[in-house]
Amino acid sequence: MKVITCVKCKQKNPASHFNKSHKKNNGLQSWCKKCTAKAVHELRHEQRKTKIQAECEKIMEACE
């Protein structure tokens, strides 16, 4: 079984814990699935927050 170290969390995991990537020489992403999922979740949360703030600003401008 091939063991790879996650660049993000530095934990050693089996290759099955990494998503595929055609861009990498070994065919796997650098971050494990857990770190990737956490990063995507945080990014989407920030995007929603930014979108809501922009919509609130538009509403406040319309009320002035």
Image (cartoon, rainbow, N blue to C red):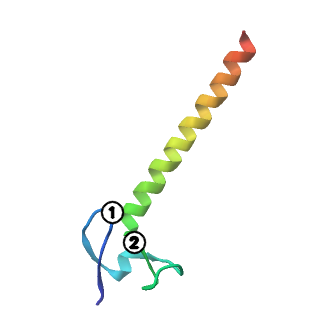
Where, by quadrant of the figure, is residue 48 drawn?
top right
Q: Are marks 2 and 1 in contact (CB under 8 Å)?
A: yes
Given the image, on which type of amino acid does mark 1 rest? Answer: Lys
Measure the alpha-carbon separation of dots 2 and 1.
8 Å
- Note whether 51 is above or below 13 in the view shown: above
Can you tell which mark lies on residue 30? 2
32 to the left or right of 9: right
Identify the image quadrant of the C terminus: top right
Residue 14: x %, y % from top left? 30, 81
Residue 17 in the image, given as x and y percentages of width and height: 36, 75
Name which quarter of the figure residue 58 lies in. top right
**x then y, percent, for residue 45:** 50, 44
Residue located 50% across and 78% down the image:
21
Q: Is residue 29 above or below residue 26?
A: above
How many numbered tags mark residues here?
Answer: 2
> Residue 8: which numbered mark, if any?
1
**Image: 21 above or below 47:** below
Residue 19 vertical placement versus 40 (above, below): below
**Secondary structure type for disc 2:** strand
Name the residue type under label 2. Answer: Ser
Q: Residues within 10 Å of mark 2 (few under 14, many from 20)?
A: some
Element type at marker 1? loop
